[in-house]
Image: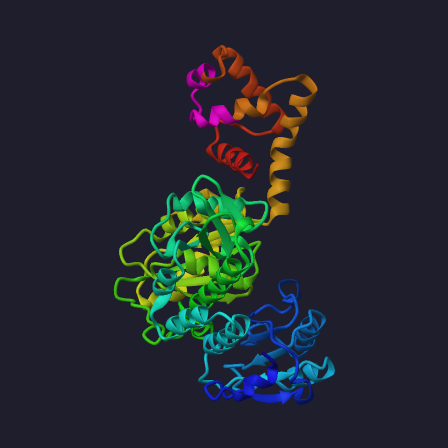
Amino acid sequence: MRLRALLAMPGLRLEVVTGADELDRPIRWVVTTDLLDPGRYLRGGELVLTGLVWRTGPADSETFARALADAGVSGLAAWDLTLGAIPDDLVEACRRHRLPLFKVPEDVAFATITEEVVRLLSRARAADLADVLDRHRRLVEGTGLDAVLDLVGHCHVLAATGRVVAGPPPPDPAGLARAFLTAPRLPHHVRAHDLSLVPVAGGPRAADWFVASEGDAADWPAERRTLISELAAIVALERSRRGLDARLAQEVVTAAATGDAPPLERAGLDAGPGLVAVAASGGLGPDDLRAVLVEILSGSRPAVGFLDGEALALVPSDGRDVAAGVRDGLGALAPGLPAAGIAAGISDVVPAAGLRGAVEEARYARRLAATRPGPVRVVRHDELATHVLLLASVPDDVRRMFRRRLLGPLHAYDRAHGADLVRTLETYLRCSGSWTRCAAELHLHVNSVRYRIRRIEELTGRDLSRPEDRVDFFLALQVG
């Protein structure tokens, strides 16, 4: 399939803005992105779709166009819903880099373009497999993945969380998901169940779905390999059809964050039971982070957008514990997350009129979560009413200086004399200043504890009988 074929699709109504002499370029795949520099996620030959969320000024257009050209992208289709036009600076940047640019009509969703292009690509790849095309037709007509899997036979489609997307439940879905996330390479054969795991999109595994098909992929005949490859493409198409359109979701999130009335009804969000805001950030690209949030909130059909590089989802509460669901979902994905992991903050349940406050609450909780260790860090709204919130709001260098000034003399004394003043202080505070309980925990005589506390006071110039000094020591220990 070549770029020129896009102009022959009446349902898309794409218009060439620049690059009319480059329309014979082949299209390998279609990708939607809101990244300013998406080069590392591209492999060449893609048709890229963008709503220009990345653009903050004319200079950004040059950065974006250069990144696409350097990655070998075939063409770009764009529309800025806010401006109602394609900026001239983007047109010029595409012309400089000989990057064909198409204008997307405002009423045509990116999901529609993706569906049409993937449908034609799949047809071209499997032109000699009439049965594959028939399954594809059934899917496009709306019969869904289950009908396709019934025809293929001995297949299951799962999310990386272990959720069964389509097909009969396989044995040990959670175990298959862990194998998918941790396998050194894919396809991967799970001998215990004689199933091979094949990725659907091929991106970061935590953000992907996978096909589990009977037998060892290494032993599959060529026809079976082609069939499963086409099935993966069909699943990718079906996945792109599900969920809320990215542009509408961004409109909802932006309106909620600015205090405007978001188009909840048009987005299919029921505010009746109340809404919850979920903020997240981590080591995944925006598109993959969006996919992860949509997956772990799959029972709610969330609206997921971005604010200042931070993902934000709005979901109906439906009486569920959204925070627990996020924690469990991310926990299942933890083996496949990058080293930076994911930090998430969850707001309280609010009515539609309180969404702006919920967004701020979720974003603040996310910032607090980002200070914690581990691949998955989730902070609920009710954790914000503690001293931890106070510490999280203080810059890192100020916290380190506070700890060093207060505890530095004690650490130095412990190193020089082999003493245990810092541990004694921590135990003393945990025991609420009780000499007896502190001595019992440390297996010391009460007089030894008294001596150590006096030494701590001498070294720091503080008085542990004073509540304010106890609070300072407690906070300094928490900073560490």
Residue at 59 percent across and 75 percent down: it is 47
- Where is residue 50 shown, x and y percent of the image? 56, 75
Is 19 situated above or below 111?
below
- Where is residue 232 shown, x and y percent of the image? 48, 62
The answer to which quarter of the image holds residue 166 is: bottom left
Is 210 situated above or below 33?
above
Residue at 42 percent across and 58 percent down: it is 295
Most common SS among magenta residues: helix
Note whether residue 391 is visible. Answer: no
- Where is residue 69 shown, x and y percent of the image? 70, 74
Q: Is residue 446 left or right of residue 420?
A: left
Residue at 43 percent across and 24 percent down: it is 431
Is 433 part of what is drawn in magenta? Answer: yes
Q: In this picture, which residue range is highlighted in magenta? A: 426-440
Q: Nearer the viewer, residue 295 or 415?
A: 295
- Where is residue 418 shown, x and y percent of the image? 65, 17
Residue at 48 percent across and 53 percent down: it is 366
Is 444 part of what is drawn in magenta? Answer: no
